[in-house]
Image (cartoon, coloured by chain):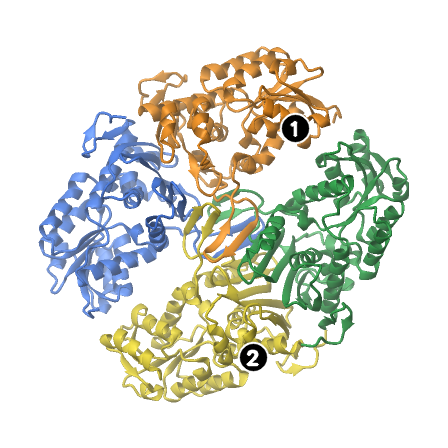
Chain colours: A green, B yellow, C blue, D orange
Amino acid sequence: MSTKKLQVGVAGLGRMGKRHALNFHQNVPRATLVAVSSPDAGERQWAAENLAPHGVTVYESYDDMLAHKGLEAVCVASATSVHAEQANKAIEKGKHVLCEKPLGTTVEVSQTVVDAAAKRPDLKVMCGFSRRFDASYRDAHAKMQQGLIGRPAILRSQTCDVLDPSGFFVAYAQFSGGIFVDCSIHDIDLALWFFDEETTKVKSVHAVGITAVEPDLRKHNDRDNAVGTVEFYDGRIAYLYASRMMAAGQEDSTEIIGTKGKLSVNLLPAENHVKIYTPGGIRQELPQTYWDRFRAAFTTEAVEFTESVLEDKPVPVKLASAVAAVKIGAALQESMIKGNKIWFDEQGNRTEKAQL
Amino acid sequence: MSTKKLQVGVAGLGRMGKRHALNFHQNVPRATLVAVSSPDAGERQWAAENLAPHGVTVYESYDDMLAHKGLEAVCVASATSVHAEQANKAIEKGKHVLCEKPLGTTVEVSQTVVDAAAKRPDLKVMCGFSRRFDASYRDAHAKMQQGLIGRPAILRSQTCDVLDPSGFFVAYAQFSGGIFVDCSIHDIDLALWFFDEETTKVKSVHAVGITAVEPDLRKHNDRDNAVGTVEFYDGRIAYLYASRMMAAGQEDSTEIIGTKGKLSVNLLPAENHVKIYTPGGIRQELPQTYWDRFRAAFTTEAVEFTESVLEDKPVPVKLASAVAAVKIGAALQESMIKGNKIWFDEQGNRTEKAQL
Amino acid sequence: MSTKKLQVGVAGLGRMGKRHALNFHQNVPRATLVAVSSPDAGERQWAAENLAPHGVTVYESYDDMLAHKGLEAVCVASATSVHAEQANKAIEKGKHVLCEKPLGTTVEVSQTVVDAAAKRPDLKVMCGFSRRFDASYRDAHAKMQQGLIGRPAILRSQTCDVLDPSGFFVAYAQFSGGIFVDCSIHDIDLALWFFDEETTKVKSVHAVGITAVEPDLRKHNDRDNAVGTVEFYDGRIAYLYASRMMAAGQEDSTEIIGTKGKLSVNLLPAENHVKIYTPGGIRQELPQTYWDRFRAAFTTEAVEFTESVLEDKPVPVKLASAVAAVKIGAALQESMIKGNKIWFDEQGNRTEKAQL
Amino acid sequence: MSTKKLQVGVAGLGRMGKRHALNFHQNVPRATLVAVSSPDAGERQWAAENLAPHGVTVYESYDDMLAHKGLEAVCVASATSVHAEQANKAIEKGKHVLCEKPLGTTVEVSQTVVDAAAKRPDLKVMCGFSRRFDASYRDAHAKMQQGLIGRPAILRSQTCDVLDPSGFFVAYAQFSGGIFVDCSIHDIDLALWFFDEETTKVKSVHAVGITAVEPDLRKHNDRDNAVGTVEFYDGRIAYLYASRMMAAGQEDSTEIIGTKGKLSVNLLPAENHVKIYTPGGIRQELPQTYWDRFRAAFTTEAVEFTESVLEDKPVPVKLASAVAAVKIGAALQESMIKGNKIWFDEQGNRTEKAQL
């Protein structure tokens, strides 16, 4: 094992950017965080206080950070709307890229990253689908591959955020691509992973949604609760639920149902091993955010991305599947807004209605 | 409280008929099982051995049983295809009726029972949606009504049977009305109950299905795994899963998600309070059949039906909602087979596409 | 199967007496409740309203009830202090007896019932250790007997009541025999059952106790929280906890640990299948009383006692083990109060200290 | 925050030593592992391959490691029998010390470390009670301190290892101090922590034990299953169970019962969030070792020890409580072997019997 350390920069220092920066700084022994960038003065101030003392250079301009001497890899953790552009620039400059999901809110934009990466097979380019790095999901996937549940046929998965009474997610909806592209993208990626992304092909999607707590989402063609169904040509179904109004905490759970068994992941979320007995019953607390639930997965993601670069191994998640996920997510979003069922032929093109 | 006992007859002595007969015989203090009927000689033989010694008369002909002296009420537990006919005959003869679900496999047939009952307001006629009598569902419904979860907006519910390797359910599919009418009817009824059947109106339904273990089901236009979505005009969604291939046992679970909280029922099924620790982990066993899970609910159902007759109170489940449930179930089945989304206008008529 | 019904009388109409009376009246198809007795006018008034209309005769005097024409069996559910006396009278009059636990608060008193029963082998006399009739405990016991956990070596069991702020249990302590005789007797009985009451012999007992919420218990040589250890000669240990101050509900749980596995019963109590999600977490409610938890077990107990009489089969719980349980319970209580460890020789006599 | 890194050496490279070395190397951003020592050639070979490439010097002699240039702190992770000696040498040489539990197997030996540390108040000396660094235990402790459960009165805690069929623990018992000093020491420490080690005083201890699977343990005055009771002068009780024969995995659970509520930690252990549904039921896997369960706690322990040195803050666990724990553990071990109950007066001296 080489003792060389990967020189990493993080683009964006918002909520997720800060976390990625600290993650690379503290939890990835084989990487060194050398630079960060943000157009936001307040975010740069945070970095000046928390990262600069440890030798991290703080940039206002992303382009300037790309020119940082010795920089080898970039973690793109900025707003979704610039993911693709920043990833593409980094690739152009010969940097390895770990890009937060999604690559973009449309298939077209997302595909540009795949195309850029295709021209530079020497670079490692990965879209960070964090759940693939979670110990529980990995355990479930391994058990499935060992045949424990026979052939997986049905996948139920949900990404449900605790209600944020500030209404932050209304403004956020303007750029997020909508609830299916922003939240359910994780569940779609899980379906592609468990159903084998190499071979499975989407046949139809259908979705409905409501605004139970935040009617203003309709201005941005979004909903706060949404249910989607994805049918695949090989006789499998994924059905998804996304919500912005959980009361108790973050509830991201998944069931994979096969011909001989079932695996569930996080069916009954818990913050830790404590149970609280008081008048009223026995209670367990929940993680309150996606990060709280998947903190360790983000570390594993960064560690393995780093390792794939340093040891020149394939990245653990193929880039193409990120486009496949956006394709399904965007179609679900469209179905939810327009009310129609959307069909694809076996080549992946939109079609009027599939042969049943 | 009167000490008079209701004289009850049970029609049909198949799997469910035997259970209903024993239930009325053993568990309903205010009822006396006086007669049973079955066209099947083997079933009558069982009754001759198990019920006749306790004073129960065994009939081959349903009509003859209806003429049994002193008979006041009939529990229709025969094949679904004769539910409506037998219920209607009983009503005509002035008998109170507890009819197994569904009233029929189509709206038209089901409606005949409602019409017949309407002519005899002196009689108690109820369709036995057993889950409404389950202590856990009742507790959840009461908590919802107390406002614990705000306004209920999303209902997820599933009725999932353990895999029966005999393939019994293939032949059964010929007459059952299909998986949405036979299984999901319970979940649909729950949606009507929790969303308030008096006011909620279905807007659209959509379903997909697969045959993961039993391709022969396609001969009867049925599937072994099915996912359905039901949209309501008041901004609510129910989404349903039904399956015939559970490995571990009967898995009937429900979540009701409101604007301020959530209630789940039987998310992680358990046969009892025992956990088994062996190499491999900690294990809990599951009920293997619907009856095992809802045995006590069937008793409560019979007890309360009996009470409603003896004390001339309204039956606990309104008959009309049984037709509403079949309407949704049959539309889901059609959507699954044909592939199209089905719309209803606010008057409940089929329409091309609703105004979004 | 005979269709004859057992004519049963219930002695005592306090909290438990009412329950036993209603249980025999409503839930035991092969028994008929024909008489009840209570020296308390208020209790008799309750019976006059709730039982007399169904043909049950209400007596002030227990002796008079014993003389009720046709009476065949008595359920003794009166105060613990008269259990033995009433049981013995019933036996003398040739009645079968189901006696609430414990037979008495001392070995001597309890033994009188065994002696009386020994003279009338034609009668069925049983002490009602309700947990032996609980479906979960029975499942655990059957699994143990099948060898699932190897040889059982350690049993942990607790009987923990929800805090009754009325302080009722202080007055109650005067006659109950103390927390080990009143509560832990169930756990001791479980140890005898799982460790095989035919062969296992107690070697030593030790206990400590505190008054965390009710110092007045000390007046009656009792405690509100107590921990006891029971050592057996065949190399097994039972350790017990009893409490009067649970906050969330009734918590009666048991673990049986064997050389190859473990079984737990009710480790995490739940009232039903509902979980409640609100800010603060996911919550489940608990049964609030012993009866709420073991209601069905009391029915099974009454049904099986009735069957043992009607079909002249051995009673399901041997009477002698009730004396063995009191012996251990009373010794634990003494150890807790005096502070000393108490030893028994292999013949069951008190001894200074066993040979180690 | 200083960016200086603490120069750490690890003594001992056995099972725990390797883990501590890798832990300081990979997971403690503010520490640098600079040296390790082991008298065992095989262990040094492992270090030569895994640590030396990263700049870690490997020593055969502990004394030589202490002389390593720039070394500031030592983690003592060698055999229990040399814990105290190595800790004392390090203190003498002016090194900060993190010592694995227990300091020694007797009070006398353990006290030497406290005495040595007392002479060097400039040094940070801590005994590593890992559970105090576990997120769940910390959450429970914080909730208790907030008053959520009233006054804690009863603590039940167990440390139960999965059965190691190699019988390793027989040889190990020769030096471990016995099951109460080796395993239950964790539970005793929890009792001291939750009951407030500053004020609570032990009054009596009593223990019993058996050899259910490994009779050879008797040669070393040890047992494979043991139950102990610890009574405190302020009216509190801790009761403990330790075992070497769990079938399913590591089972370390704790309940803290207060006058107004209860907290449980890890009552139903789980390896992760996965549940497995197959014929036979729903199953969850367990951590197989103490390290698997408490891996993150060991990291927190090392991080906080490092921080206490770098920032000259008090260590998070007071050294004196490590002696108090050994005192109770050794007394329990003695009680188990000799069969007697052991009493202490309020000054902590052995006494014949306390005033009750």
Q: Please state which of the two labelled residues, at mark 1 or mark 2, is closer to the viewer.
A: 2
Q: Which mark is residue A138?
A: none
Residue pointed to by mark 1: D24
Q: Are marks 1 and 2 on the same chain?
A: no
Quarter of image, res B18: bottom left
Circle count: 2
Q: Secondary structure at mark 2?
A: helix
**Point 37% across, 68% down: residue:** B299
Residue pointed to by mark 2: B219
Of B50 and C165, the residue lying toward us: B50
Q: Position of residue D262 (x, y in %)?
A: 46, 40
**Point 35% across, 48% down: residue:** C147
Q: Chain of mark 1?
A: D
Q: Position of residue A48 (x, y in %)?
A: 82, 34
The amino acid sitting under disc 1 is Phe
Residue C58 in sight: no
* Residue A239 placement, left or right of A118: left
Q: Chain of mark 2?
A: B
Q: Position of residue D112 (x, y in %)?
A: 51, 13
**Point 27% across, 56% down: residue:** C301
Q: Quadrant of the N terminus of chain A?
A: top right
Q: Quadrant of the C terminus of chain A?
A: bottom right
Of C125 and A146, the residue lying toward us: A146
Q: Secondary structure at mark 1?
A: helix
Label 1: how many residues lie within 10 Å, few (<14), some (14-19) or many (20+)?
many
